[in-house]
């Protein structure tokens, strides 16, 4: 293999590695965004269940008194 061909391949491989790092960084950003959204959903769901639990406790209390 000629020296220019080796150099071309090395440059191409370097560019490929750079592209892979770029793709990896984008994926990492998307995973972080999804993680944040999932945390929000989990907090929202927990708050809803807490509210339902309080409502059901009040209803049960009324039924016990009635």
Image (cartoon, rainbow, N blue to C red):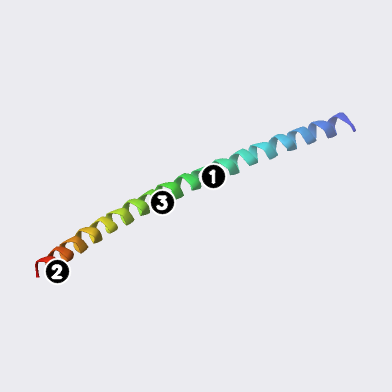
* Disc 2 secondary structure class: helix
> Mark 1 or mark 2: which is in front?
2
What is the C-alpha distance between the residues marked 3 and 1? 18 Å
The quadrant in which residue 55 appears is bottom left
Position of the N terminus, as image quadrant, is top right
Describe the element under mark 1 as helix, strand or loop.
helix
Between 59 and 41, the residue placed more toward the observer is 59
In the image, which disc is placed on residue 63?
2
* Nearest the eye: 61 or 23: 61
* Count of numbered circles on the image: 3
Report which residue position mark 3 lands on.
38
21 relative to 64, above or below: above
Look at 49% across and 46% down and name the residue there: 31
* x, y percent for residue 37: 40, 51
Residue 7 image point, x, y percent: 80, 31
In the rendered view, tell whether residue 4 sits above or below residue 56.
Answer: above
Quadrant of res 41:
bottom left
Q: Which residue is at the far right?
A: 1
**Mark 2 / mark 3, whichever is N-terminal:** 3
Q: Position of residue 6 (x, y in %)?
A: 83, 32
Q: Earlier in the sequence, mark 1 or mark 2?
A: 1
Residue, disc 1: 26
- Report crowding for label 2: few under 14, some 14 to 19, many 20 or more residues within 10 A (C-alpha): few
The CA distance from mark 1 to mark 2 is 55 Å
* 65 relative position to 8: left or right: left
The answer to the question of whether label 3 and label 1 lie on touching residues, with beta carbons closer than 8 A, is no
- Residue nearer the viewer, 35 or 66: 66
């Amino acid at each position: 293999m000629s020296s220019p061909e080796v150099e071309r391949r090395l440059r191409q491989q370097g560019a490929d590695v750079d592209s892979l790092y770029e793709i990896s960084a984008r994926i990492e950003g998307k995973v972080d965004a999804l993680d944040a959204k999932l945390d929000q959903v989990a907090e929202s769901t927990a708050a809803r269940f807490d509210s339902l639990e309080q409502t059901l406790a009040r209803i049960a209390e009324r039924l016990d008194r009635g």
